[in-house]
Image (cartoon, rainbow, N blue to C red):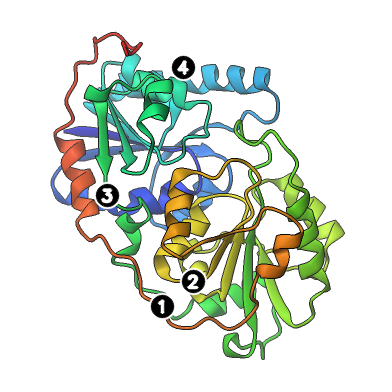
């Protein structure tokens, strides 16, 4: 088959890396498009993934987002039509879902967050909507995904690539170079804290997170910690660098999985990095200010994630060298997704709007 995968955001690189390799090993032709956003092209290169860069983020404001969606959908449609793909797969790239459907491909969208408004687009355009088993049925119905197209999997999507993860022993040296640490800096002698800011320009993030601002100030004032911050956008990078000079911002793209593995704790205003930490056994704190996703609630119930909702909650964070913890493993999940892609049902000419 000819299979098209769209990498629309940085976390998609790790998720699809093993899927791409497995599909190629099985003899499928795989085409890859990449959105120029959040270091996704750089991370794809780091992962050895070659693709065509098409489109970028629409920025702030609903009108700009809509125009950007239309523009990228059109360019992706041309790409798909030219290459005559059989199947289009993404982690909720709504531009790809629309483009693939219009170009005659069978569309699979994978998603694990019920708070994304654009689910309305991708869930209706897709032939298959793959979600974790904790994703609510009412949310699926609300976004237009009729039961016949829903595929539920057990566990967490991060287990696709972390169940077989092996850390890179050279990563700490790369981190030292990227952050400008002193030559005698040793991981064992420092508490390494990694922080990921909220996705402040995302469609689902329509509020200001004052707790996160307070966190950065507290970390900036702590001389006993080494804090690495991974900004999402150039504006975030400039703002954090100016306001919090005591925090470290890498000057290049780094392996996120290795950073999670070697960190003593992760604090994130987003989702993927916290979930990666929870799977790998690194203490993780979510500082997301909105309604907690069902996946995060499940990880909290398993004791693998803690929620920080207020400034007062910041006192709950334990800054210490981490102890060894078990890794969550679902080694069958990769093959489960491969099987789903190879046997995706659906006819590209079916009506796009779901009948619930």
Closer to the observer: label 4 or label 1? 1
- According to the picture, the residue beneath numbered tag 1 turns out to be 325
Measured in 3D between alpha carbons, the distance from the residue under mark 4 to the one under mark 1, in whole angstroms, is 46 Å
Dot 4 crowding, Cα within 10 Å, few <14, some 14–19, many 20+: some
Q: CA distance from mark 2 to mark 3?
A: 21 Å
Q: Nearer the viewer, residue 82 or 104?
A: 104
Q: CA distance from mark 3 to mark 4?
A: 34 Å
- In primary-sequence order, the first of circles 1 and 2 is 2
Circle 4 or circle 2, nearest the eye: 2
Q: Where residue 22 appears, x then y in whole percent?
A: 21, 51
From the top left corner, tell me how far across and down residue 337 is, in percent. 23, 44
Residue 222: where, in percent of width, then height? Answer: 79, 76
Give the residue pinned by disc 2.
282
For residue 154, the mark is 3
Secondary structure of the residue carrying tag 2 is loop
Q: For residue 176, say whether it is visible.
A: yes
């Amino acid at each position: 088959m000819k299979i098209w995968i769209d990498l629309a955001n940085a976390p998609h690189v790790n998720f699809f890396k093993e899927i791409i390799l497995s599909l190629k090993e099985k003899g499928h032709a795989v085409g890859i498009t990449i959105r120029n956003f959040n270091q996704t092209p750089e991370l794809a290169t780091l992962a050895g993934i070659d693709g065509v860069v098409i489109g970028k983020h629409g920025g702030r404001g609903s009108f700009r987002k809509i125009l950007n969606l239309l523009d990228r959908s059109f360019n992706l449609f041309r790409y798909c039509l030219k290459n005559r793909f059989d199947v289009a797969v993404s982690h909720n790239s709504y531009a790809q879902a629309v483009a693939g459907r219009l170009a005659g491909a069978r569309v699979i969208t994978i998603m694990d967050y019920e708070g994304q408004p654009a689910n309305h687009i991708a869930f209706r355009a897709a032939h298959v909507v793959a979600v974790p088993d904790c994703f609510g049925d009412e949310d699926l119905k609300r976004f237009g995904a009729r039961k016949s197209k829903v595929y539920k999997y057990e566990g967490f999507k991060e287990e696709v690539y972390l169940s077989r993860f092996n850390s890179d022993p050279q990563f700490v040296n790369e981190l030292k170079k990227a952050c400008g640490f002193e030559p005698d800096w040793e991981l064992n002698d420092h508490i390494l804290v990694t922080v990921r800011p909220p996705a402040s320009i995302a469609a689902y993030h329509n509020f200001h997170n004052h707790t996160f601002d307070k966190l950065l100030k507290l970390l900036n004032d702590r001389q006993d910690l080494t804090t690495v911050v991974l900004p999402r956008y150039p504006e975030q990078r400039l703002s954090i660098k100016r306001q919090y000079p005591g925090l470290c911002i890498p000057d290049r793209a780094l392996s996120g999985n290795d950073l999670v593995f070697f960190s003593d704790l992760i604090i994130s205003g987003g989702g993927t990095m916290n979930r990666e930490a929870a799977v790998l056994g690194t203490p993780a704190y979510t500082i997301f200010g909105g309604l907690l996703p069902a996946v995060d609630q499940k990880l909290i119930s398993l004791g693998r994630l803690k929620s920080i909702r207020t400034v007062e909650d910041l006192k709950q964070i334990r800054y210490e060298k981490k102890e060894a913890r078990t890794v969550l493993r679902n080694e069958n999940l990769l093959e489960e997704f491969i099987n789903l892609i190879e046997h995706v049902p659906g006819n590209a000419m079916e009506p796009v709007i779901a009948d619930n």
